[in-house]
Amino acid sequence: EPEVTQTPSHQVTQMGQEVILRCVPISNHLYFYWYRQILGQKVEFLVSFYNNEISEKSEIFDDQFSVERPDGSNFTLKIRSTKLEDSAMYFCASNDLAGSEQYFGPGTRLTVT
Amino acid sequence: RKEVEQDPGPFNVPEGATVAFNCTYSNSASQSFFWYRQDCRKEPKLLMSVYSSGNEDGRFTAQLNRASQYISLLIRDSKLSDSATYLCVVILLDTGRRALTFGSGTRLQVQP
């Protein structure tokens, strides 16, 4: 069964450093998303991406964040200068139609020290 | 007011019990509704979509009341493997938004 994959599974970084989280969505999917979940809190939407551009973003997705689809398979989330409060689980998701089931990757646990 | 509100639980029930979770959403423009399941430190996984007429999938039954902006999930004959956090999720499709809006989840612990 096709699945969304994410690397790395765990990333530890120092405050102020740049990180890139990587995702490979399901191959025939057209819509891509990033969500985050701070430990003990709810899953929060960051950004959605369609047709090589951001289609929607939340207030969390500020200038420190960017997304890119550098080739036909990868979908990345970059945090330019990490803060302690960026520590969270970051989930990538994808689907083939708007409103259809979103399939989530296993997540990347980001720890900012 | 929270966009999607759930009782956090935990609900501690014995194996074989029937348990019901409720969820309310604040935006009447919400168009699509789901229950997701999340195991500890894992990704959310779709349990079932929720339709206006109500729908059933094995031991799981979901109901939607648009007038009251209320969604429910009923689990019959609980199994140990049902222990997880159950997330109520909505989408506001009419604005073109495709992102999922999650509730904080209701934790279920099924005990032997």
Image: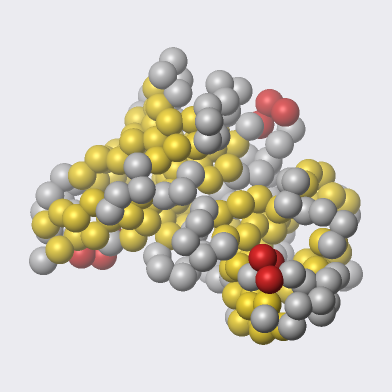
Camera-nearest residue between B11 and B39? B11
- Relative placement, left or right, of A84 versus B103 is right
Q: Position of residue B65 (x, y in %)?
A: 39, 22
Q: What residue sits 40% from the left and 27% below the top?
A: B70
Residue located farthest toward the top when viewing the structure as drawn: B67
Camera-nearest residue between A65 and B34? A65
Q: Evaluate whether residue B75 shows in this view.
A: yes
- Relative placement, left or right, of A12 versus A56 is left
Whether A101 is drawn above or below A79: the answer is above
| Total numbered labels | 0
Q: Position of residue B54 (x, y in %)?
A: 36, 29
Q: What residue sits 74% from the left and 74% below the top?
A: A21
- Relative placement, left or right, of B101 versus A11 is left
Query: Which quadrant of the structure image shows residue A110?
Result: bottom right
Query: Which quadrant of the structure image shows residue B108?
Result: bottom left
Q: In which quarter of the image is the C terminus of chain A?
A: bottom right
Whether B66 is drawn above or below B54: the answer is above
Q: What residue sits 74% from the left and 46% below the top?
A: A58
Q: Which colour scheme is used?
A: secondary structure
Q: Where is residue B109 in the image (x, y as percent from the top left)?
A: 24, 60
Q: What residue sits 69% from the left and 67% below the top?
A: A86
Query: Which quadrant of the structure image shows residue A3?
Result: bottom right
- Relative placement, left or right, of B67 versus B82 is right
Q: Position of residue B14 (x, y in %)?
A: 11, 57
Whether B4 is drawn above or below B104: the answer is above
Q: Evaluate whether residue A76 shows in this view.
A: no
